[in-house]
Image (cartoon, coloured by chain):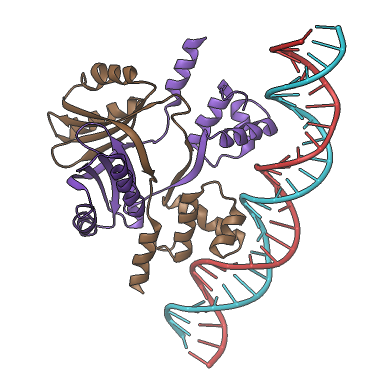
Chain colours: A brown, B purple, C red, D cyan
Amino acid sequence: MSGGKLDPIDRKILAELQADGRMTNVELAKRVGISAPPCLRRVRALEEAGFIRGYHAQVNSRDLGFEVQVFAMVGLNSQAEADLSRFEQRCRNWPLVRECHMLNGEIDFILKCVAPDLSTFQSFLTEELLAADNVITVKTSLVIRGAKLEPGVPFDVLEARAAEVD
Amino acid sequence: MSGGKLDPIDRKILAELQADGRMTNVELAKRVGISAPPCLRRVRALEEAGFIRGYHAQVNSRDLGFEVQVFAMVGLNSQAEADLSRFEQRCRNWPLVRECHMLNGEIDFILKCVAPDLSTFQSFLTEELLAADNVITVKTSLVIRGAKLEPGVPFDVLEARAAEVD
DNA sequence: CCGTTGCTTGAAATATTATTGCGCAAACCG
DNA sequence: CGGTTTGCGCAATAATATTTCAAGCAACGG
């Protein structure tokens, strides 16, 4: 990647692959307006440069028996770096915790959790999360429904900015 | 899909594709222990049955110029269904809002937002979100760092449950 | 102004992969 | 038992990915 800068074609590639990660390379090439070989090279370069971190199937948790999704707002006793790291490491080892973000403000961490049912989550909450070292406060909120679920980047905003630069 | 039930091979397929959505079908077949054609048939069936909702490249927002990630906890004035839906619809039209979850408890919605910089987010916050009809409270928290980012389902938990059934 | 360098492209060739068609075996059911 | 269903895998075919290579093009320095 020459200098780490992306041209409009690269951005379009990223946008397309974000929308459909299994698109064939020929289809992708057609959409971004170049032929297949350079398109593939660009994709590889984007992967190597870390712009693309991976590809994942989006699986329907509910159908798989994970009826419950919960956000947990966690407050810690100590915010020393060592303690923060220790808590993060714990989160990595809890399968029910799918995302863990460190925040500023009075909440130290927000966790996105899943569970097969409420009682499983409650057990986790009381026996694991609340019982964990250094954890002071946990406020939980059940997800009633998800209205928009598009992790990633809004490429339309990106294109608007790129246009301004011209 | 015969009745909608999944056997261990199906679950393994889902787990593998969740981990790497661009895996070739032959590789996938090798890993789950069957030959390519039935493997592909299973994948197609899983897609049709809705267990797989799509495939997406995970793009690195920071590299693309989205330095800021924010969780916004939103409280509404009215929780009438029509008002909730209207707010959800707004969220779908805001590019900076990437996820919108309706919660129980005192927070009505949690939004995961991204922005190129703080001032962009502030403008969005004051001119769009806070200005929106029916919005009473918005508490925001900047994401300092993400420690675990694995949306989806913990298949190890799933397998443990399946084993119990035996 | 021209040649060199560095970089990117696209056509063609080749290697892999996806996909279809079909026969086979096990499980299930009357 | 015989018929039906279901899912498997082999083999053939179609599509795709990937490599190879020659050519185009801009920047640069003589």
Q: Is residue B62 above or below residue B31?
A: below
Q: Is residue B4 above or below residue B93?
A: above
The answer to whether residue B87 is visible is yes
**Which of these two is toward me, A141 or B19?**
A141
Measured as percent of width and height from the top left, residue B164 is found at 47, 11
Measured as percent of width and height from the top left, residue B17 is found at 52, 35
Measured as percent of width and height from the top left, residue B144 is found at 22, 44
* Residue name at image x 51 percent, y 58 percent: A42
**Which of these two is toward me, A32 or A114?**
A114
Q: How many marks?
A: 0
**In the drawing, does residue A138 fall left or right of residue B9?**
left
* Residue name at image x 49 percent, y 16 percent: B162
**In the drawing, does residue C5 fall left or right of residue B83?**
right
The answer to whether residue B95 is visible is no
Q: In which quadrant of the rendered image does the N terminus of chain A lie?
A: bottom left
- Write down the quadrant of residue B155 in the picture: top left
- Write down the quadrant of residue A30 in the picture: bottom right
Measured as percent of width and height from the top left, residue A13 is found at 49, 57
* Residue name at image x 35 percent, y 60 percent: A157
Q: In which quadrant of the rendered image does the C terminus of chain A lie?
A: bottom left
**In the drawing, does residue B5 fall left or right of residue A95?**
right
* Residue name at image x 24 percent, y 35 percent: A110
